[in-house]
Image (tube, rainbow, N blue to C red):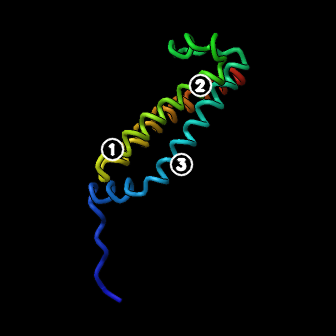
Amino acid sequence: MSLETPRPESAPTLFSRVVSDDSHLWLVTLLALVLDVATTMFGLSLGLSELNPVVLALMPQFGALGTLLLLKSVVLLISGTMWVFLPVRYRGAIPIGVAVPWGVAGLMNAQLILLTSVG
């Protein structure tokens, strides 16, 4: 037992500790993927339009779901390859860098769905 007050971790130490557990980061990435794909598919079923020109170009060949899964798979393949070759201390940036835009897209889709349904 000690009477010393614990010192707060510095920002770099805290960040390093957070990104050292990559399995949690990859789980968040997969959740962001599901959020983005699910909200996109639901939004399309409500009559909303896809705005990504790459997705729009591939949808006639693969359908909406096929296109989304194809593109997400390519991103996961590239990011997984990068993750393997990066030094351990930088690997956490890869799933974070993938999860953030997918999560933002999913949340924006959800907002549009809510605005369309309510308003």
Q: Secondary structure at mark 1?
A: helix
Of the residues shown, which amino acid type is indicated by label 2? Answer: Leu
| Lower sequence index among marks 1 and 2 | 2
Residue at which label 2 appears:
68
Q: Position of residue 119 (x, y in %)?
A: 69, 20
Residue at which label 3 appears:
27
Task: Tell me how far mark 1 sits from mark 3, CA to CA.
Answer: 20 Å
Q: Within the image, what quadrant is residue 83 found in?
A: top left
* Label 1, residues with CA under 10 Å away: few <14, some 14-19, many ≥20: few
Task: Out of 117 and 17, give the one closest to the viewer.
Answer: 17
Does the residue at mark 1 contact the one at mark 3 (Cβ under 8 Å)? no
Residue at which label 1 appears:
85
Task: Tell me how far mark 1 sits from mark 2, CA to CA.
Answer: 26 Å
* 77 relative position to 88: left or right: right
* Label 3, residues with CA under 10 Å away: few <14, some 14-19, many ≥20: few
- Name the residue: 60% across, 28% down: 69
Of the residues shown, which amino acid type is indicated by label 3? Answer: Leu
Q: Position of residue 3 (x, y in %)?
A: 30, 86
Q: Secondary structure at mark 3?
A: helix
- Name the residue: 43% across, 41% down: 80
Establish if 66 lies above or below 107: above
Of the residues shown, which amino acid type is indicated by label 1? Answer: Phe
Q: Secondary structure at mark 2?
A: helix
Q: Position of residue 109 (x, y in %)?
A: 59, 26
- Name the residue: 57% across, 13% down: 58
Q: Within the image, what quadrant is residue 2 found in?
A: bottom left
Q: Position of residue 52 (x, y in %)?
A: 52, 16
Task: Out of 28 and 70, give the one closest to the viewer.
Answer: 70
* 31 relative position to 25: left or right: right
On residue 10, which mark appears?
none
Establish if 4 lies above or below 27: below
* Label 2, residues with CA under 10 Å away: few <14, some 14-19, many ≥20: many
